[in-house]
Image: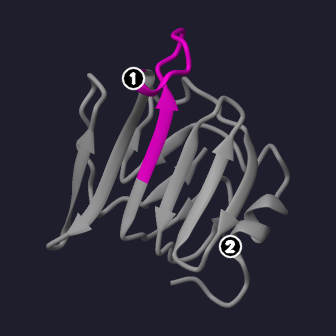
């Protein structure tokens, strides 16, 4: 769990160039490495789930984020669950085109579930979230 400061407020206080970028969750790139650039527009934290909204109606949800580490990349080293949702690119933004990757830390590893055609192979040894 994060410290007493609101992780969403700290995230949104970062320079916009730092709080966006290519997304990697548990070692899995979304798309090819450095292929996509996501720009965050808002964030909220309810004490359990950090929700970050991005400019193309994409959502990153992070359950029980450990901390926010800012350097060359923004990282959240540990979380109990991470879900990335996006609309299939080039298609209408309808419920049937809403895709997701859902990662859960279980039994010392990370499981993943997706409705995307591209499965992921997450690693517990990688940060839960990285924006590079």
Mark number, residue 1: none
Q: Which residues are magenta?
A: 83-96
Residue drawn 57% across and 44% down? 59
Residue drawn 24% across and 32% down? 119
Q: Position of residue 74 (x, y in %)?
A: 63, 57
Q: Image check: 12 left or right of 31?
A: right
Q: Secondary structure at mark 2?
A: helix
Q: Position of residue 90 (x, y in %)?
A: 54, 9
Instruction: Place residue 123 in its image quadrant.
Output: bottom left
Q: Is residue 84 magenta?
A: yes
Q: Position of residue 62 (x, y in %)?
A: 49, 62
Q: CA distance from mark 1 to mark 2?
A: 32 Å
What colouring style does the render use? one colour
Label count reads: 2
Q: Is residue 124 magenta?
A: no
Mark 1 or mark 2, whichever is nearer to me = 1
Residue drawn 67% across and 53% down? 72
Q: Which residue is mark 2?
A: 7
Q: Earlier in the sequence, mark 1 or mark 2?
A: 2
Depth check: give the residue in front, 48 or 14. 48
Residue extending furthest top? 90
Q: Position of residue 34 (x, y in %)?
A: 55, 29
Residue extending furthest left? 107
């Amino acid at each position: 769990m994060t410290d007493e400061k609101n992780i969403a407020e700290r995230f949104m206080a970062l320079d916009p160039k730092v709080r966006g970028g290519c997304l990697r969750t548990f070692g899995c790139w979304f798309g090819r490495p450095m292929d996509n650039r996501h720009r965050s527009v808002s964030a909220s934290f309810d004490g359990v789930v950090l929700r970050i909204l991005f400019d193309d109606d994409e959502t990153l949800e992070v359950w029980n984020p450990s901390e926010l580490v800012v350097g060359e990349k923004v990282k959240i080293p540990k979380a109990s669950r991470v879900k990335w949702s996006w609309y299939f690119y080039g298609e209408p933004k309808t419920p049937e085109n809403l895709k997701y990757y859902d990662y859960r830390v279980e039994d010392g590893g990370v499981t993943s579930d997706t409705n995307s055609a591209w499965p992921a192979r997450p690693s517990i040894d990688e940060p839960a979230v990285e924006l590079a």
